Amino acid sequence: MKKKKRMGAVLILVCLLLCLAALLYIRQNRTISKESDVEENAENIGNEESDSKIETNITVEDSQVTTCRQIDANLSAELESGNYTFDNPLVVVNPYQNSPLTALVLFNTKKNVSVKATVKGDEVELDYSGETDAGTAHKVPVLGLYAGRTNQVLLEMYDEDGNKTKEQTIEITTDPLPESMENLVEIYESGEDTAMPFILVTGQSTYHSFVFDKAGEVRWYLSENSGSYGIFPISGGRFMFQDRETMIATYEKPHTTKMYEMDYLGRTHKVYYLENGWHHEVIEKEEGGNLLVLSSSIDEHVEDTVVEIDRQTGEVVQELDLREIFGDTYVDMIDWAHLNTIDYNAEENTVILSPRNLHSVIKVDWETKELIWILANPEFWEGTDFEDKVLEPVGDIVWHYQQHASYQIPDTDDDENTIQLMLFDNHWDKTRDVDFFDGYEKSYVTQYTIDEENMTVSQDHLYGGVKSKITSNFVLDLDANRVFSMGGYLDPEIDGNNGMIYEFTYDTEEVVNQYALANTFYRAYNFAPDYASLEEDMEQDTRYNFGSLEGFTKLEETIETPEQEISDSLEMKIIDGVIYIKAKDHDVTKIFLKGSENCYEIDFSETLPGEDLYENVSYYVTAPLRSLKADTYDLILEYQEEMVTTEKQVTIKE
């Protein structure tokens, strides 16, 4: 009987979400650039009121946030109907159509209770559990489901004193994995119990961020493809998701200008825009606080700046261009610095940065922008103005080259005058060759002790693994005495695998578990959802767009309407008052809106000609409409170096 009730619940689910499921893949996208115009032309992307003031023959679509909010509101309304109890709940699989191995279990109780949901694993240690806060209306999150099978999920109710009052096991059936996600993980070594039985893998050719368990089974994934840097966990059980379609044209690789704040049910809560794009890293200065993001100057160089984004407004409130520190030293190629890590110390208001192409880690005062020290092979800085900032080595050191993931870690000694730093040493020098490279064939997770007063450094630990030439990171768990080496880009590949994860004992540096991954990846993390927050309703009437895009410049004189029509069929859409136009890299160099009284332009041509490697990469460029005067405008493009008309029109109403 219970099984029939569960089947009925699934049918209700289909009726509830069918009209919304197709909407969730709708994406916001765009491109922006040109540092010279950012100050005067930047347009704030704020409250979402503009689409109602627009008439157009361009398709207008809902934002990803709006779609998720609508689904969430429908689920809450269904719960408020009072039709579901603990014994007869509504089970909604993949409720937001973006996280297939999740579910929500909806029911009401007369008393305040908390609920624990446990997906039963193939072994006891592979069970995945989470518990909600006490209440009477329950949308219990279920995470860690297996793909392509009927999962057994144990539900347990607890009263306010922590006593179990009731339990039952329900069945939740999931769809199989996409073919591209089959056989992603191979167990190379399985020894002692792991400190991290569920590992999140993201970025590079791992387009679907996913979680695997110690047995190598996929237990969570996003059906939406991310950009090459994937997702970045932040506080509150959420993460920043890198949009892969909204880009800024640069001199080399185009960069994302949009990121989504999401949770592990697949809900999109906020959208952040950054004019010059972002890459490699985004962190919070504090929980829920401002964002520190790696960006680009787009001033003949890329991947050389750090910006602080006000979390409430999206405005850039602080910016550091590494040329402010190093001047012309080593500024000898477009990607001269290649920042890939930022680590913030709130007590000192300092940042630790990893400019990979300088083979160095640096510490900087975030307020004054003063360089405090450099951690690198001293030979690299000999004869420069920065020799006195280089830490002096004490004892033998295997120096890092083109490192990633450089972070200060909790103190591991009793000396209050020292700090410890750990990094992933790719041990690769192909971007910036140096004569003193040692040629070692391994990559390492390396721990240093730094005496900042005496400006010295010593090497404490060296965890060696196969060569991972780019990307990669580490995870440290001192309480469990473990270090994880996340090698994301093997060179050469091993048995058809392109990634390798090791679990070492921290003190003895011995390998206890090892996993090979079929695809390259950017980073891997501990999987740490927040069950209580996943049960909360989404905010409905609050702002969700933050940051700014480069806006239109009003031309003093109008342009002639070109006779030539565009020959290619370009994908276009409007979301939240922004036009999105999809084309190949550097194909759209100017966007014009020609009205009866006004004429506007956005110019993307500064970074021409671009790099041949990315000439076939397609993405959206954007044109925000919010600040334009009321008029009816023809959309005209400079496309592939020719002026063309598009037959598209936009009317901005008063």
Image: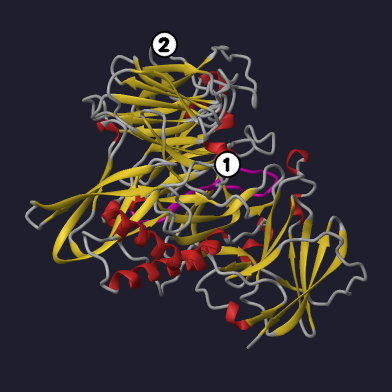
Residue at the spot of label 1: 228
Q: How many marks?
A: 2
Above or below residue 95? Residue 612 is above
**In the figure, is residue 612 to the left or right of 443?**
right
Rendering coords of residue 274 (x, y %)? 56, 57
Above or below residue 171? Residue 593 is below
The prevailing secondary structure element of the residues shown in magenta is loop
Which structural element holds mark 1?
loop
* Residue 144 appearing in the image: no
Whether residue 295 appears in magenta in the rendering, the answer is yes
Please name which of the two marks, 1 or 2, marks the residue nearer to the observer.
1
Rendering coords of residue 483 (x, y %)? 34, 25
Q: As drawn, which residue projects farthest toward the front?
A: 1
Q: Identify the magenta region.
A: 287-305
Rendering coords of residue 430 (x, y %)? 64, 23
Residue at the spot of label 2: 396
* Kind of residue indicated by mark 2: Asp
Alpha carbons under labels 1 and 2: distance apart: 36 Å
On residue 510, the disc is none
Rendering coords of residue 255 (x, y %)? 62, 48
Give the crowd class for mark 1: few <14, some 14-19, many >=20 residues within 10 Å.
Answer: many
Which residue does the image show at 41% across and 11% down from the upper left? 396
Query: Which is more toward the observer, 633 or 12?
Result: 12
Which structural element holds mark 2?
loop
